[in-house]
Amino acid sequence: MKFKLIYPRWKKLERQTEFHLPPHGPVVFAATLPDDVEVDFVDENVESISFDDSPDFVGISMMLTCQVKRGWEIADRYRQKGIKVIFGGIATMLHSEETMQHADAVFLGEAEGRMDGVFRDFRDGRLHKRYDYMNDFPPAESIGIARRSILKSKYYYYRGVQMVDLVHASRGCRFDCYPCCVAFLGGKKFRPRPIDRVTEELEAIDNNRLFIVDNSLAQDKEWERELFTAMIPLKKKWCCHPIEDDDEILDLAAQAGAWYVYQAIFDTSDYIRDRIRRYHDHGIAVEGTILLGLDNHTEDYIRRLIDFLMKINLDLAEFTVLTPFPHTQAFDDLHQVGRIISYDWNDYTADKVVFRPKNMTPEKLQDLYTYAWDSFYKSEPQSYKMFKLLQKVMEKEKADGTFRGRRRELMDSRFGKMKGSTGDQS
């Protein structure tokens, strides 16, 4: 059977340096497909879709709300040709009712152990409109190695440097954060994969540089201790979301190859200042993730927050505006009182204000978002800060003998004159 799997295009943050990571959801999903299914994968962010072909079945994997309208357009094109289409992925779960209007089937939940039945239904001509496995999670040990062979890896480079490969060591999250939909999607229980299954997958990835995409690694200290200890011999270099604020854990993470973390900066407290310093003390760089537009944010507060960021030695910063994605508390609260001003899902890119803030106009928050990016990267453009971050990983690779010299040659030639230039939005 010929199955065409499509990942619709989506718009990057307006002020973010443009690069493309290999998508994670499609390769995890592809690993669950029956052996006799031949997969043709198209990531529309890096290549165009040809609608001239005639696959037996089309799957559309959507991660982000801002992908859904394009996903619907693609499905409509194939269905007009009489080809059946199934949707899956995070954004399908967030927008299932709307998506069903453009689908022959929607799959909701995690795919491990379920695809044999779905494809059997397709072959038998009795495909269900809705396969709902929300909150019916497969055993963590059933999560296999992602099928990265479907990727056309030549597309996932930035200025000649190979981007990180994505991998996950756990699912679910015990933190139910206000603007986040993870509790709805993956449950409020931390579900770690067996350590040996994680290391087996890490060893199978040819790329030395990885992004561990778990919602947070700081959910179970003993599990972190075991995971990082097992990772040390692999000599991988990786970034992730927060790590436990504990000297032993941070030291093990550094030994295991922690390169940098995405750390939420939610106030100007000494706790945040010390959190960043402690990462740095262990040789781990920090990209601050800063959400603007919460109800306690005034114009003065946001300006003071940005001033604070300049003083705590962040290696990078990424600014977003509060976006009320469906099935979050933020959406429920803002929708209930009529503060959402756009329900155009193409606007839900986290860089557009789609609601009325409590303490300012939408236009003022949009201006402050631009001000935040401009202020933080005024002295050094984002692309040069990225170059310095890459230098850090090269130093780590040289120290343990995993450095590939060709990378340095490419980086020197492409980044060498970047300091003092404007930001890169290629």
Image: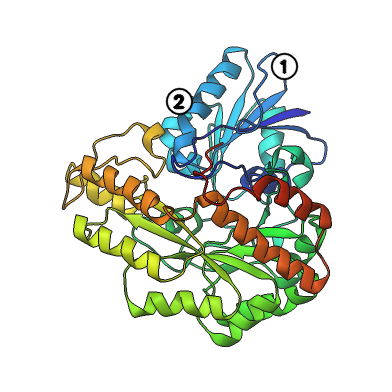
Say which residue label 1 marks. 53
Residues at marks 2 and 1, CA–CA distance in whole angstroms: 23 Å
Q: Quadrant of residue 89?
A: top right
Q: Quadrant of residue 23?
A: top right
Q: Callout 2, which amino acid?
A: Gln
Residue 169 shows in this picture: no
- Please report whichever mark, 2 or 1, sits nearer to the chain's N-terminal start: 1
Quadrant where the N terminus sits is top right
Residue 300 bears which disc, if any?
A: none
Say which residue label 2 marks. 101
Please tell me which residue is depicted at 37% across the width and 62% down the height of the picture: 177
Q: Callout 1, which amino acid?
A: Asp
Between tags 2 and 1, which lies in front? 1
Disc 1 is placed on an element classified as loop
Left or right: residue 270 versus residue 400 is left
Left or right: residue 290 versus residue 218 is left
